[in-house]
Image: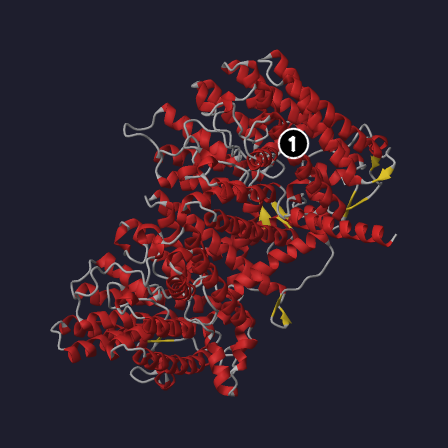
């Protein structure tokens, strides 16, 4: 990061001002880093498939370095649009570059490799690699690392970037973003990112130690700590966590997933203030714990016919796995009673806390939407009542409420639309709804034929492309990708022109507002 | 106020008569008692009608219906004549009244079915009554043809009456109490109290009643032309215009095997799902208001596009046939108007078109219609809201209103609509979980919950029409659908507020009696 400021290679002035390319180049270097980690493991295990990884590391690294070094950020006044564009471009670049090692190693066709790469970097964990275990340690470790690196990207995105772009109400958490509060977007992001990555690495180390203590080997512990904390859910084993068949290991993995689904700034605050109570003080955290306990209890109750201890073990693991959007599997929950599956489906929609590596809606949005729904009922009884929405002690500004509701509705509309599209492409309802929700939430396993015991090869090419799009859409919190794809600014210009024309003439359009306000 | 209404071309509210003297004659000031009495009277009239039809058709159970008509007539007449409505109502009273009307309908209907001995179990009577008065088409009658003609007429009549009441509720009461943002299209003004004696309300009610009756009449004529017998024409018209969906035959419209009747049914369902206030405006002022209504255009677009997509995806191997196209359009109209009539059903289709159908059901009919669902105007406002969110993302300080067509929707209304959307989702989700927990399969439970909240009736998979319907669900699972239908029909908040207000006023009354 310090190189970012000191320049080097080209002198600053000679670089091209292209923020998107610059950030994308930096991201490609991270992908190359994941490749290099895979390469190292390959060499340690003396598997003989190191050439593809070396080749990919070199190629991606070189491309990334060139993109990074020949461009620069805008020095002053980097605007919302630049930032959104940079986010969109760099995730597309990561997705494509991440597919390279799979293709070069010859294990996946290009479109499958793209799916696996997107599933990795977005922390989804749906896989088209089958069987998994036949591959070399290096490639599998690279696959784990894609999720860990993706998690790093997500944390920065969720804590340091999106709140400042005001995406879906995340602006609520601006003040929590660790690091000095600076007006300049760029130095703030790099400072915050450094702190977040410190926490991220420390937590990964903790999770690794816990998993080691639970009885995993070092390779397994690092692999699962990385994807558990990145709430990705890839595992180097065909049958995921049930490979270990141990309640202790499951408890350790639950711990890792839980760590990954708590808001990262809270760790920072707890560390700074030497005070663990910050967690409990966050209303979203309390809501998270309440949902975990309630759904575990409810699913245990529903599954009681399989024996309460077994039901409890399965429920606890899968509830945490799905709400954290991790997606590790133990039991095949597509065999559970339908009601339990529907509950799991909704957990995949809610997701865990904002500012963590988990995906989906995020709980604070669920809280706000729920409270809004409830206050509209109260308002029916007392139409002139004023009911501000609180999260914790402070009322939320109405603008933020509006933006949260907009996001929730966007999410809902996209999900329903995609379920219809996927069904029209030939999937049945449980499969299409499960896979859409799982892809948008970055979870991994779906329902129907795409359950945890299956893989995403059950979908055909077009369906997989829909899912790839949804994974990126969900991970980037919709707007960066939508604004990247749709010519929204043109629409804005059109609509402003229209309203200007309208203001000139007299027509009924605006009169209605006045009548409504009477 | 009337100028504002006229400017939107929705309805002209200049009452010529005043029902006020009729409304306020009773001894006790109890608006809720008055409407309960009216509801019972309406049921009595329906029972009388059933008895008369029974006399001219198969003559079965005529005596029973005559007794019931007498009983309901006396009870309802007494109650409504002894209670009077105050000049001005509090909106909370309106909620209790609305809830009370539906509960009264259902109670009367349950008692009727029990007296007739139509069902073996009480919960079946309850289900059939709720499904009838909420204009849902889910039925627990395995073979309707085995029922007496009088019972069939009663059954269809519950839907017709339910549709009419829903219409009055949606058009006259909802806007004045401001639920769910429906007033965008209907009235435009909002006040916290409502006056049943206002000329505006009364004349609107009159016009809608007239329109509803004449639409039903038109349906009867169309069905007669298509070749139905007079009795079938009457009952099918009643359940089609009310977007109810009960049928006299297990095969619904498919029973007749007549192209003309199917297209007539299609037309009837489309009309039933259209905004009645808009249709009234068209009757009064020509077709211009129709063309100017964005919601109507959207409604027709949904039907046409949905029909084309489904026709293409369900075409048999040899390509499109007239039959497959007709069925596609029939079922899309049935889903979009939330009616629930069918021709052959969609159980044999691929999952894709079925899921599309379910989505169309969830969105539902136009505002101000007898249909249910989330309603198109809210869906359109939601689209406008999302468009604005995108704009605000790029230009956070932009001032841009949410629009439905050319109309601007105030932020307050939008907020109410989004709130309703969230409530709708929560109710459907909890309903799906409840049905599944009580024994439904995955697809069955989800589709049953959505279909019930939207007041459609049939769902997907096992619940697809022609596959056995709700009878495949276990008894407790069926019972879980009952509250969903009511919540969907009354747009959720009125039920909750009605219960809360009713309970608190009841406890206050009890306390005051105890103190005395």
What coloring was used for the rendering? secondary structure
B165 w.r.t. A145: above or below = above
Residue sitting at the far top = B56
User: Which residue lies under the disc numbered 1?
Assistant: B111
* Foreground residue among A388 and A371: A371
- Report x, y in % for residue A35: 24, 74
Relative side of A429 to A35, left or right: right
Number of marks in picture? 1
The quadrant in which the N terminus of chain A is found is bottom left
Report which quarter residue A87 is drawn in. Answer: bottom left
Residue located at (26% from left, 75% from top)? A220
Whether A491 is drawn above or below B370: the answer is below
Specify whether residue A483 is in view. Answer: no
Q: Nearer the viewer, residue A317 or A429?
A: A317
Q: Position of residue B392 (x, y in %)?
A: 54, 61
| Residue pictured at 30% horizontal, 80% vertical | A212
**Residue depicted at 60% across the width and 32% down the height:** B290
Residue A233 visible? The answer is yes
Place residue B472 in its image quadrant: top left
Dot 1 falls on a residue whose secondary structure is helix
Estimate the x, y position of residue A483 in percent, counting from the top left. 44, 59
Q: In the figure, is residue A93 to the left or right of B147?
A: left
Towards the viewer: A25 or B420: B420
Q: Quadrant of residue B28?
A: top right
Q: Chain of mark 1?
A: B
Q: Residues within 10 Å of mark 1 (few under 14, many from 20)?
A: some
Q: Residue at x 32, y 43 (%)?
A: A426
Q: Position of residue A349 (x, y in %)?
A: 45, 58
Residue B442 left/right relative to A131? right
């Amino acid at each position: 990061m310090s190189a970012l400021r000191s320049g080097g290679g080209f002198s600053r002035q000679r670089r091209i001002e292209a923020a998107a390319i610059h950030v994308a180049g930096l991201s490609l270097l991270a992908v190359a880093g994941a490749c290099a980690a895979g390469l190292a493991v390959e060499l340690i295990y003396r598997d003989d498939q190191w050439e593809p990884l070396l080749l990919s590391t070199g190629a991606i690294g070189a491309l990334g370095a060139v993109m990074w070094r020949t461009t620069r950020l805008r020095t002053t006044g980097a605007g919302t649009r630049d930032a959104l564009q940079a986010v969109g471009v760099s995730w597309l670049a990561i997705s494509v570059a991440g597919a390279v090692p799979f293709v070069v190693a010859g294990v996946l066709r290009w479109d499958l490799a793209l799916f696996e790469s997107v599933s990795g970097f977005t922390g989804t964990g749906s896989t088209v690699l089958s069987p998994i275990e036949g591959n070399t340690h290096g490639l599998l470790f690279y696959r784990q690392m894609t999720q860990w690196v993706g998690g790093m990207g997500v944390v920065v995105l969720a804590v340091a970037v999106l709140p400042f772009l005001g995406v879906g109400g995340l602006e609520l958490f601006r003040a929590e973003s660790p690091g000095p509060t600076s007006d300049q977007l760029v130095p703030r992001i790099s400072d915050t990112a450094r702190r977040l990555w410190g926490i991220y690495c420390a937590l990964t180390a903790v999770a690794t130690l816990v998993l080691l203590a639970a009885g995993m080997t070092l390779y397994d512990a690092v692999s699962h700590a990385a994807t558990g904390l990145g709430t990705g859910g890839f595992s180097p084993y065909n049958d995921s966590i049930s490979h270990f068949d141990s309640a202790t290991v499951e408890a350790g993995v639950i711990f890792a997933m839980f760590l990954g689904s708590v808001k990262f700034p809270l760790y920072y605050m707890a560390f700074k203030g030497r005070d663990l109570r910050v967690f409990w003080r966050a209303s979203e955290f309390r809501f998270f714990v309440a949902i975990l306990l309630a759904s575990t209890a409810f699913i245990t109750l529903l599954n009681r016919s399989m024996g309460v201890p077994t039901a409890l073990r399965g429920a606890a693991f899968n509830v945490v796995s799905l709400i954290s959007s991790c997606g590790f599997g133990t039991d095949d929950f597509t065999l559970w009673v339908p009601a339990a599956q529907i509950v799991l489906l909704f957990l995949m929609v809610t997701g865990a806390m904002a500012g963590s590596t988990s995906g989906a809606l995020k709980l604070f949005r669920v809280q706000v939407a729920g409270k809004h729904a409830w206050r509209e009922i109260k308002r029916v009884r007392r139409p002139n009542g004023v009911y501000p929405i609180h999260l914790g002690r402070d009322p939320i500004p109405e603008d933020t409420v509006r933006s949260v509701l907009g996001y929730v509705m966007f999410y809902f509309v996209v999900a329903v639309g995609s379920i219809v599209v996927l069904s029209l492409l030939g999937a049945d309802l449980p499969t299409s709804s499960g896979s859409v929700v799982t892809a948008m939430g970055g979870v991994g396993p779906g329902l129907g034929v795409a359950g945890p015991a299956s893989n995403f090869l059950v979908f055909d090419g077009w369906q997989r492309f829909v899912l790839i799009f949804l994974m990126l859409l969900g991970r980037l919190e919709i707007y960066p990708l939508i604004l990247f794809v749709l010519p929204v600014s043109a629409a804005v210009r059109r609509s402003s022109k229209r309203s200007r024309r309208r203001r000139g003439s007299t027509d009924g359009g605006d009169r209605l507002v006045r009548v409504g306000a009477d | 106020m009337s100028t504002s209404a006229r400017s939107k071309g929705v309805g002209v509210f200049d009452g010529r008569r005043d029902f006020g003297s009729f409304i306020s004659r009773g001894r006790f000031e109890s608006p809720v008692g008055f409407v309960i009495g009216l509801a019972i009277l309406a049921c009595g009239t329906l029972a009388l009608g059933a008895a008369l039809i029974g006399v001219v058709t198969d003559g079965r159970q005529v005596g029973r219906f005559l007794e019931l008509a007498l009983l309901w007539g006396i009870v309802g007449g007494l109650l409504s004549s002894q209670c009077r409505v105050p000049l001005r109502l509090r909106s909370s009273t309106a909620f209790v009244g609305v809830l009370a009307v539906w509960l009264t309908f259902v109670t009367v209907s349950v008692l009727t079915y029990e007296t007739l001995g139509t069902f073996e179990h009480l919960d079946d009577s309850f289900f059939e009554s709720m499904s009838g008065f909420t204009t849902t088409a889910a039925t627990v009658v395995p073979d309707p043809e085995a029922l007496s003609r009088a019972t069939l007429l009663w059954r269809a009549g519950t839907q017709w009456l339910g549709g009419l009441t829903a219409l009055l509720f949606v058009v006259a009461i909802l806007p004045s109490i401001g639920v769910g943002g429906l007033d965008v299209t209907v009235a435009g003004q909002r006040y916290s109290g409502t006056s049943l004696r206002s000329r505006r309300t009364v004349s609107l009610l009159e016009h809608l009643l007239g329109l509803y009756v004449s639409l039903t009449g038109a349906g009867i004529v169309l069905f007669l032309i298509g070749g139905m017998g007079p009795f079938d024409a009457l009952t099918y018209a009643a359940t089609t215009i009310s977007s109810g969906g009960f049928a006299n035959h297990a095969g619904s419209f498919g029973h007749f095997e007549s192209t003309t009747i199917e297209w007539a049914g299609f037309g009837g369902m489309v009309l039933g799902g259209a905004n009645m206030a808009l249709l009234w405006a068209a009757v009064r002022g020509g077709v211009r208001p129709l063309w100017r209504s964005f919601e109507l255009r959207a409604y027709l677009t949904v039907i046409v596009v949905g029909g084309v997509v489904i026709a293409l995806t369900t075409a048999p191997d040899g390509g499109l046939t007239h039959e497959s196209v007709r069925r596609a359009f029939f079922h899309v109209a049935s889903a979009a108007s939330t009616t629930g009539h069918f021709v052959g059903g969609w159980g044999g289709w691929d999952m894709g078109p079925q899921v599309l159908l379910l989505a169309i059901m969830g969105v539902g009919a136009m505002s101000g219609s007898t249909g249910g669902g989330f309603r198109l105007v809210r869906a359109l406002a939601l689209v406008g809201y999302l468009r604005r969110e995108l704009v605000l993302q790029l230009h956070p300080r932009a001032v841009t209103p949410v629009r439905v067509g050319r109309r601007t929707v105030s932020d307050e209304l939008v907020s109410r609509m989004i709130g309703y959307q969230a409530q709708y989702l929560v109710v459907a989700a909890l309903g799906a979980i409840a049905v599944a927990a009580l024994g439904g399969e995955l697809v069955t439970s989800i589709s049953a919950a959505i279909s019930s909240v939207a007041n459609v009736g049939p769902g997907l998979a096992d619940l697809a029409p022609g596959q056995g319907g709700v009878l495949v669900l276990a008894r407790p699972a069926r019972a879980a659908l009952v509250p969903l239908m009511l919540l969907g029909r009354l747009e959720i908040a009125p039920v909750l507020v009605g219960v809360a207000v009713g309970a608190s006023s009841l406890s206050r009354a009890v306390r005051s009696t105890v103190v005395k």
